[in-house]
Amino acid sequence: MTDVFLPVRAALGEVIEAVMTNSEINNFGESFMVHPDGPNKLERAKNLIDQLDDANLQPLVKRLVAKLRNAIENDPSKNELLQTLKNSFETNLHVKISDDGSMSPINPSGMDFLNLLSTGPNRKHMVKNTPPISMSSFYHVRISRKGEPWDVCKLDLSEEELRTRVLVPYENETPFTLAGTTISFDKFEQIKITRTSEDSSKLLHQVREEAGKSGIATMIPEEYDIIDRGIDVTDDFIKGPPGYKKAKIPTSSSVISRTPIQTITSLCDHFHVVVKQLQHRHENRKTLSITDEYDVQDLMHALLRLSFEDVRPEEVTPSYAGTSSRMDFLLKAEATVIEVKYNLRNKELRDQLAVDIETYRIHPDCKTLACFVYDPNSKIENPIGLERDFAGRPNGVMKVIVLVRPLP
């Protein structure tokens, strides 16, 4: 024999707590000559339900549905509460709640319930020979919050409901609503999850029976005792602190899943697109215009910082033919030197590249030489052929890559 009204009572209490203020609960109670006292709003809400006559259930449901539908306009998350209320009535009492809050039977059992309301027997003594919910396990959740005297409790969740309503938000540290309360992680303190083979209605009977035998009055909510009667499965579901599965912002080291040369090539491929985009600033504000090789170097330096931790500009090179110079960029960890060229014609470019190759071939930190040739005016004839020429030259242990961009 199962008290089928307990889950409905819980759903009604959750809705009342979410959409009614304490004064509204008191005023509603006074209109039916009851006094909904309690240590917190949830207890006052359940106290109100317990004290109402059965004939007053319909006005209460209509009032709550109207308030929920108004609240949904500003807070769509309240729709979940409305659906929970409707599902509770349909599953446990076989009664459908319409959009205006009126109730209609789904089957003969629902008709019996509505007839009982009109003839007066107390709904809290209604019983059915079969349990209203067909589940092998019932999960119960208790969440404590910093600075709050009462914990948030939710009973009789299926495993799927537990995962979607509690675990997924917890794992991603996103606020969620439980028992009419928004759980935000700035105040989150502890979570407890237990499992029982019986629903909370049977457990509540045991709790009340034992409390009656002890003769000791207590202000501890009954939900606490129900949850504590289950097997603690918190560690089976909670594998880390709030947000432990939240997508992390990738660091530069995790972004570089490609080789350094692939990353440099991608930056060069998109360099001209970035240059053009910089010319379109909000309200025509000042921007970086590419007028010489130093401008190209400045922009390339910024782009390299997106993907590499250690970018060293203007490192001194070893002496070649009696003189030394400064390389544009050294990626020391990647043993790569990047040289930038701008607005050159074929012969001038080939001459400079030949000197660069001889210079860096003996540099201890250079295993790869990448030459970026920014050629927006297409001065380089046959850039693909030029790239292949230098890529195919034997340069000892040093690899040479020439990238002319944009390609015509």
Image (spheres, rainbow, N blue to C red):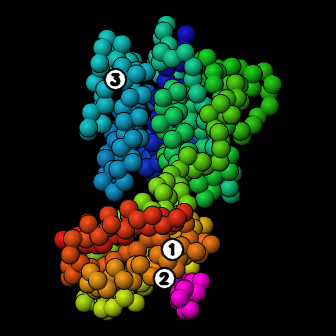
* Residue 311 position by quadrant: bottom right
Look at label 2 and name its amino acid.
Asp
**Position of residue 179 measured from the top left corner of the image (x, y, whole percent):** 52, 41
Q: Is residue 35 visible from the viewing direction of this image? A: no
Residue depicted at 60% across the width and 31% down the height: 140
Q: Which class describes the residues within 10 Å of circle 3: few (<14), some (14-19), or many (20+)?
A: many
Using the image as rendered, state which of residue 240 and residue 176 is in the foreground: 240
State the mark number for residue 328.
2
Using the image as rendered, state which of residue 260 and residue 255 is in the foreground: 260
* Residue 299 position by quadrant: bottom left
> Circle 2 — which element?
loop
Look at label 1 and name its amino acid.
Val
Badge 1 vs badge 2, beta-carbon distance below 8 Å: yes
Q: CA distance from mark 2 to mark 3?
A: 77 Å
Q: Which residue is mark 3?
A: 95
> Circle 1 — which element?
strand
Q: Is residue 232 left or right of residue 26?
A: right
**Position of residue 173 measured from the top left corner of the image (x, y, whole percent):** 54, 51
State the mark number for residue 152.
none
Extent of the magenta region: 313-329
Q: Which label's residue is closer to the chain start, 1 or 2?
A: 2
Q: Which residue is mark 1?
A: 337
Residue depicted at 65% across the width and 30% down the height: 236
Look at label 3 and name its amino acid.
Val
Whether 286 is among the magenta residues is no
**Position of residue 319 measured from the top left corner of the image (x, y, whole percent):** 58, 87
